[in-house]
Image (cartoon, grey):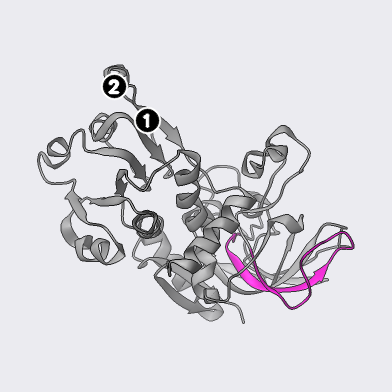
Amino acid sequence: MRVQAYAAHEAGGPLRPYEYDSGPLGANEVDVRVTHGGICHTDIGLLDDEFGISRFPVVAGHEAIGVVEAVGNAVEGLSVGRRVGVGAIAGSCFHCEWCLRGETNLCPARDDTVMRGDRGAFAGHVRASDWRHVHPIPDAIPSAQAAPLLCAGTTVFSPLLVNGVRPTDRVAVVGIGGLGHLAIQFLAAWGCDVTAISTTPAKKADAERFGASGFIASGEEGALRAAAGSFDFVLCTVSANLPWDDYVGLLRPQGTLCVVGVPEQPIALSPMSLLPAAKRVVGGIVGSAAHTRQMLDFAARHDIRPVVETFGVAEFEKALGRVREGSTRYRAVVEFA
C-alpha cells in the first residue's frame, strides 16, 4: 500500500507531503486509516531534533484514531471498519520477561510509533506491528478527544495503578497542561483529594473545573513551603527544571513524587529530602497495552475528556506552532478525514 504522509525533511523544517510503500502486511499487523491525530511535545522533539536522534525525513505522530482497513491472518478480535486507536506503542515482542508480566511498555523491543523515522502517524494510514496494541475506542468518546488519551491519557493514568494510588490519598498535580489537565480529571474520578500546582493563579478556574479542590501558585513566595508534608502522591507533568527538594518536601512520610515530564537538567536532591521519611522519586511512562485499555474504559465511564483544539490538514503548521509555543488549550488534534 502506498501511504500518504507528512514529513519534515530537516530539523524544524515544514511538513511536506511524503509517500512510502508500507510493504506486505504481516500476520499480526493491522493497517489503520487515520481520521484524527494528536500532537504531543514528543512529536515536536523529533521534528526539531531536540533529542539528537532524528533520522530525516521524519514522519512524527503517535496519537492516531481511525478505522481498521486491513488485518493480518493471525489478528484476533479486530475487523475491518472498527474504530480504533494506535498510540505511543504500536507493538512489543510478547515473549520477553516484561511482556509475559503484562508490562508491554517496558519491552526492550517495543515498537515506539514516533521513533520509526518515516513511519509515524502523521499520515493517512498507520500500521501497528501487533494487533494487541490496537485499541478499540469506546463509543462514548469522540475521535478528536480520544486521540490525546493514547499518549497523554495513558501516561498520567498508568502511574496511579503502578504506584498504588488510593481513593483516600491526597494528591497534587504539578502543571495544568496537556498531561496535567487529564491527570486532575482522572484523580478526581479516582476519589482522591486533588490539588493543582501552577506557577501563577491564571489556570485556577480551569483546575477547579477539571476537579481540583485545592490550588497552589508555586511562583508565590513561600507557597510550596506552606504546603510541606501535605500529599501522599505528587505527579509532576511539566518539562521544567524545578526546585526538587521543595517538591519532595510536599510529601507525607513514605510519599511518592512521580515525574512524567522531561526536565532538561538532571534532577538533583538532597539525601535528607528522601531518607528521614522514606520518600520516593519515581519515573512514569506511557501505560502498557492493558493499562491503556483500562484507561479508555475509565475515561468513557467517568466522562473524562481532554480539552482539544482541532485543525484541518491545511492548518498543520499552525497546530505545530501552537504546540511549540505552549499556547494550546489543552491538546492539538489534526483531522485527516
Residue 322, x across and y down, in percent:
40, 67
Which one is earlier in the sequence, the residue at label 2 or at label 1?
A: 1
Quadrant where the C terminus is found in the figure: bottom right
Does residue 39 appear in this view? no
- Residue at which label 1 appears: 267
Count the marks: 2
The secondary structure type at the circle numbered 2 is loop
Quadrant position of residue 14: bottom right
Residue type at tag 1: Ile
> Label 2 vs label 1: CA separation?
19 Å
Residue 284, x across and y down, in percent:
48, 41
Q: Nearer the viewer, residue 160 or 43?
A: 160
Residue 4, x across and y down, in percent:
72, 73
Does residue 299 appear in this view? yes
Residue type at tag 2: Ala
Q: Residues within 10 Å of mark 1 (few under 14, many from 20)?
A: some
Q: Which residues are magenta?
A: 60-85
- Residue at which label 2 appears: 277
Residue 140 falls left or right of residue 102: left
Quadrant position of residue 191: bottom left
Residue at (55, 60) in percent of width and height? 150
The secondary structure type at the circle numbered 1 is loop
Marks 2/1 in contact by CB < 8 Å: the verdict is no
**Residue projecting furthest to the front:** 168
For residue 72: magenta?
yes
